[in-house]
Image (cartoon, coloured by chain):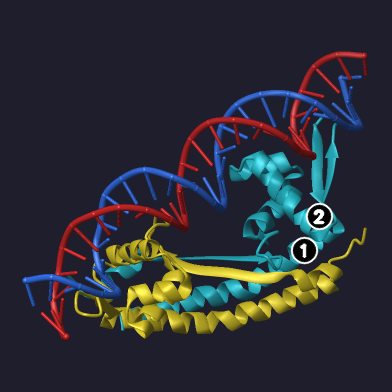
Chain colours: A yellow, B cyan, C blue, D red
DNA sequence: TGTCGATATGCAATAATAAACATATCGTAA
DNA sequence: TTACGATATGTTTATTATTGCATATCGACA
């Protein structure tokens, strides 16, 4: 058996998750919600965003409830009724939050990827 | 209702996890295993490390099995029997892996924390 | 004023994960 | 050669997370 990482390294992939929580680790708002919030704004409805990501409406709705419960004010402006059934878009606060998270990710993503490259190189030595 | 993040920000905490997987997202080896590997080396046994972290031996053993199955060679040198029941320490490869992950974390941790600080500041604006 | 499709929500079923229980194996030192 | 405590592993029970099903509500518009 080859006692070396070498031939396994190409099969390794990097994963990471970053999220915010309250002090009990609850009320989580992370990558998933960030993604869906962006997509809701883009598509104009929760349902359309769910379909796009293949998520169940039920689960998504529960997630969105959590984040708004945590902050105590809505990040989404939801409208029911109408010929199109209803629409949803981000509130001012929602936009601010999404943009802040955008910046956050932009600042850490490349560093993590770079660190991973170094890790792989270290294992080759 | 206050439409501002301001008064909630102090209750928010940062969380993140970084891990490596095979192409199917399986064979995971991340922060948990990194931590326990270091502790096993320090304590000299799997059991002692488990007790320290409050993890079940069964679960830990399963985790360690996974990582070694993935690489195809042991990261741990395990000994059974003896008056002390047995001991475990890292192999050369185990040490290399742990050290590489040490470096990896050292290079990304501060950036992530700094990014979080900026995120919070952004939400205050 | 009836139709439509999305929002809104409860609840049962199911899957995924972790914990708990049980037991066998090993080898050294007394 | 027996006792000890850690390694090693199967099985089962709990916990939690996710899915799926069902159903009510809403309001612009035809």
Label of residue B35 in the image: none
Q: Do the residues under discs 2 and 1 have CB atoms within 8 angstroms?
A: yes
Of label 2 and label 1, which has the lower sequence position?
A: 2
Label of residue B97 in the image: 1
Q: Position of residue B81 (x, y in %)?
A: 85, 32
Q: Is residue B25 above or below residue D10?
A: below
Residue located 39% across and 61% down the image = A59
Is residue B5 visible in the rendered image? The answer is no
Find residue B33 and report its image quarter. bottom right
Q: Position of residue B111 (x, y in %)?
A: 56, 77
Q: Residue under label 2, please give it.
A: B75
Observer-nearest of B25 and C12: C12
Q: Position of residue B1 (x, y in %)?
A: 16, 69
The tally of labels here is 2
Q: Mark 1 Cα within 10 Å, few/some/many (few <14, many 20+)? A: many
Q: Is residue C13 above or below residue A77?
A: above
Identify the chain of the residue marked 1, using the numbered disc in the image: B
Dot 1 falls on a residue whose secondary structure is helix
Observer-nearest of A79 and A123: A79
Dot 2 falls on a residue whose secondary structure is loop
Q: Is residue B113 left or right of residue A117?
A: left
Q: Mark 2 Cα within 10 Å, few/some/many (few <14, many 20+)? A: many
Q: Is residue D12 left or right of residue B120?
A: right
Q: Position of residue A19 (x, y in %)?
A: 46, 68
Q: Is the residue at mark 2 from the same chain as the one at mark 1?
A: yes
Viewport quadrant of the N terminus of chain A = bottom right
Between the residue at mark 2 and the residue at mark 1, the CA separation in whole angstroms equals: 8 Å
Identify the chain of the residue marked 2, using the numbered disc in the image: B
Residue located 40% across and 76% down the image = A49
Residue located 83% across and 44% down the image = B78
């Amino acid at each position: 058996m080859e006692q070396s990482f070498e031939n396994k390294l190409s099969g390794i992939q990097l994963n990471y998750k970053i999220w915010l929580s309250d002090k009990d680790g609850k009320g989580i708002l992370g990558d998933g919600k960030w993604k869906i919030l962006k997509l809701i704004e883009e598509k104009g409805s929760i349902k359309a965003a769910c379909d796009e990501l293949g998520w169940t409406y039920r689960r998504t709705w529960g997630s969105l409830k959590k984040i708004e419960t945590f902050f105590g004010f809505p990040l989404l402006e939801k409208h029911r009724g109408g010929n199109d059934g209803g629409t949803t878009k981000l509130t001012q606060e929602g936009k601010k939050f999404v943009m802040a998270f955008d910046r956050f990710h932009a600042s850490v993503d490349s560093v993590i990827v770079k660190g991973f490259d170094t890790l792989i190189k270290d294992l080759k030595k």
